[in-house]
Amino acid sequence: MNLTSSGLAKGIFVVDTHVHAQRHAYGFQKKGEDPDYAALGSGMAKSVVYDNSPRLLYHMDRYGVDVAVIFPAFGMTNEIDLKIVDDHPDRFIALAWDVETRRKSESGEKKWNIKDSIAELDQLLSTGRFKGIGEGFSSGHQVGISWQEHLEMYCQYMELCRKYKTPAQYHTGFPNGYVGGPGLASMVGNYESPWANPLHAHELAALYPDVPIILCHSGIEGSGYYTDLYTQCLHVAASHHNVYLECGQWWAELYEVPLKDPNIGAEKLVWGTDWGASCTPQSWMPGCVPETFCSQDNKIGPPSHQVDVYGWSMRELGKLNIPQDDLNLILGGNAVRIFGIKTPHTRLFKEYLGRPSLNVYPDHGDKKKK
């Protein structure tokens, strides 16, 4: 595959499948003190959050992003996301998270348990206002338990996705830098969690072949130029028809192998950038491969500005010399089918009559319109 310098990638209908539309106001650092990066992970859950959608919409409009899939994380709320959707129903769809269950656990009010988590999500999904669970499953945060114990809890989340005919977001990978060390230990505390071994997703995908699974981050979550977990994600996606790879933080060279793999291809890539995760700027290594990548710099600390991930991600995609119809699938077409997003017109994305093997979109149980 030839890499070019064609500028920003453009799509006929663009969807970012991984967006945090709320922002934290940190209170863990006092004026004059050195930053305490270990407090960043735990501090995010306790910080004040606010609606960041005006800034998000500005970025979306500048780069031609039509729809964003938004969901909470680290102290953010489902209520704020619903208000954002209500204010701009044509620009956003929301995924739910077990915010109250996690809040009670983090405050010491009640120990986290899978029953409360499932009950909260079941109630939220039953409203019809949420299009899935995001970001990932909360049981992945639990420390010191086996994969078999994780799997039993993960299956309960998957049953909810099957019940409400939604895709499942499965988290993979960790950031490095100031959150990747002591901060990550305080936030997750379990380097043997399912996040750290994407190959565990093989079992989940085989048990629920009717539920589309998106591997969030695909092992590249502000993790610098390390690609070991990315390679494992490719292995899972190449083995299951219902597994999709989130690619918004990939540099250009990472697209080459999955696009050439006949078991993956453009039909299984979804663009999700983690927009709003302000602690993940880009780093630069001139003359190296990659030259630029998403990472956290311990020397300068977290940014206070809104990192421009759209410009960087679209420049990396713009280096690919692939058919526009394939690029359209990556930037939006696959997400439109997976999440049931409405578009201004039908037949925007490639699909071939008489070639059903190429129509590899998930079936949510609804009969296809003739």
Image: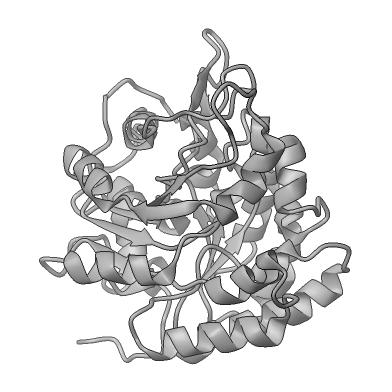
- Indicate the position of residue 338 as horizontal and vertical percent values: 39, 70
Residue 315 spot, x, y in % from top left = 34, 29
**Picture quadrant of residue 127:** bottom left
Q: Is residue 328 above or below residue 366?
A: above
Hey, which residue is sitting farthest left in the picture?
344
Which of the 4 quarters of the picture holds residue 29? top right
Q: Nearer the viewer, residue 189 or 309?
A: 189
Residue 24's x, y, as percent? 45, 47
Is 174 on the left-hand or right-hand side of 244? right
Residue drawn at x 75%, y 52% is: 196
Q: In this view of the protein, which residue sits in the foreground, 114 or 197?
A: 114
Q: Residue at x 57, y 55 (%)?
A: 46
Q: Residue furthest front?
A: 31
- Here the colouring is one colour
Residue 223 appears in view: yes
Residue at coordinates 77% horizontally, 66% vertically from top-left? 142
Left or right of residue 168, residue 226 in this image? right
Q: Is residue 222 above or below residue 129?
A: above
Q: Is residue 227 visible?
A: no
Tag count = 0
Viewport quadrant of the C terminus? bottom left
Residue 149, position in %: x, y?
83, 76
Report whether 328 appears left or right of 64: right
Which quadrant is the N terminus positioned in? top left
Horizontally, residue 156 falls left or right of residue 342, namely right
